[in-house]
Image (spheres, rainbow, N blue to C red):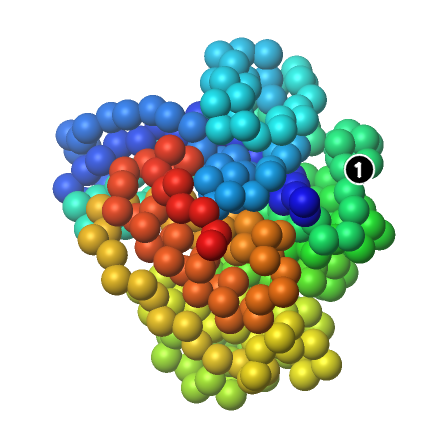
Amino acid sequence: MSHVVVVGSFNVDHVWRVPALPQAGATLSGDYTTGPGGKGFNQAIAARRGGASTCFVCALGDDLGAQLARALCTADEIDLRDVVVAAPTGTAGIYVDAQGRNSIVIGAGANAALQPVFVDEALAGLKPGDVVIAQLESPLDAIARALDAGRAAGATTLLNPAPANVAIDHAMLERADILVPNETEFAALLGRHVGARIEADTISGIDQQRLHALCRDLTRGTVVVTLGSSGCFVSHAEANLRGDASACYRVPAEAARVVDTTGAGDAFNGALAASLALKPERCFAEHVRFAGRYASRSTELYGAALAMPRMAVE
């Protein structure tokens, strides 16, 4: 069986549900909860609950947050490969408004101490057919090492360039077989690497062929731009359509009763990785449609990791 290997962050999320997102100088009252999160962990949970055998590689502190990570990985049968460092486990402060929109502040903590040498050790057993997925809440040299290891083993490499990071170089993008940014991240990458200045909130309205051309200017691999309630846009290189009939197309979002969009992008990425690992014979559009359904379902519950639905690839 192929595996999903997630290299990334674990955070303890501190969440406030408020009528509106805070403005400068404002004091608000809200309902408070805490729970697990971090883009890496969210994606690992999504991949596992999507039905894939999943390994999660991360750095943790020597604290209650680390104990929470281990307990949750055990409960969901995730193979946790962690290194304990002299920093607290990562944290995040999250505000969620009445429409389910969010604003997030991250304290990297132990996540910033993930080293390439540990990534090498943790990924030693990779094989063809596996899927390696990474994000940008960990040091870039560790992420580069993970993607390089995936490529060397014949695994599929997937990069979610989140949060947007102007330090990411073009070589990092080329390490990914599949690049999955949202509108904000896509706009940032275009500005840095293509020289195209485009407002993030206009991307969903750009003509399909223009979007495809921008993706092809950005990287050689497949690009999936997630567009929130507008679904997503897929762009392939003509030389590798991944079983699809067309080099570019849109996939509409699934209908959902949205209460909280926190972690929806992570749900999409984890589910996409699970589908790729479990059903490699399918065309790419089917993987994307499953990921979209999974992400929509995740917005119907409050929270990040714990809102990931138990909805296996069929």
Q: Is residue 59 above or below residue 256?
A: above
Is 309 left or right of 158, judged from the image as shown?
A: left
Residue 172, picture quadrant: bottom right
Q: Indicate the quadrant containing the N terminus: top left, top right, bottom left or bottom right.
A: top right
Q: Is residue 211 left or right of residue 175?
A: left
**Label 1 Cα crowd, 10 Å radius (few <14 / some 14-19 / many 20+):** few
Is 264 placed left or right of 277 in the picture?
left
Point out residue 143 in the picture as x, y percentages from the top left corner.
Answer: 70, 44
Please give the count of numbered marks on the rendered protein.
Answer: 1
Rendering coords of residue 181 (x, y %): 52, 60
Work out which residue is located at the far top of the displayed protein and give it: 63
**Residue occupying image coordinates x 63% and y 35%:** 55
Establish if 108 lies above or below 314: above
* Residue drawn 63% across the image and 48% down it: 133
Q: Secondary structure at mark 1?
A: loop
Residue found at x 36% / y 71%: 252
58 left or right, relative to 291: right
Where is mark 1, residue-wise?
125
The image shows residue 141, relative to residue 16, as above or below, that is: below
Q: Residue 62 sits in which quadrant?
A: top right
Nearest the viewer among 232 and 241 is 241
Q: Residue at x 52, y 62 (%)?
A: 287
Q: Is residue 16 visible?
A: yes
Residue type highlighted by circle 1: Gly
Q: Nearer the viewer, residue 246 or 83?
A: 246
Q: From the top left corner, tell me how far across and down residue 159 is, in percent.
A: 62, 54
| Residue 241 screen position, x and y as percent | 64, 77
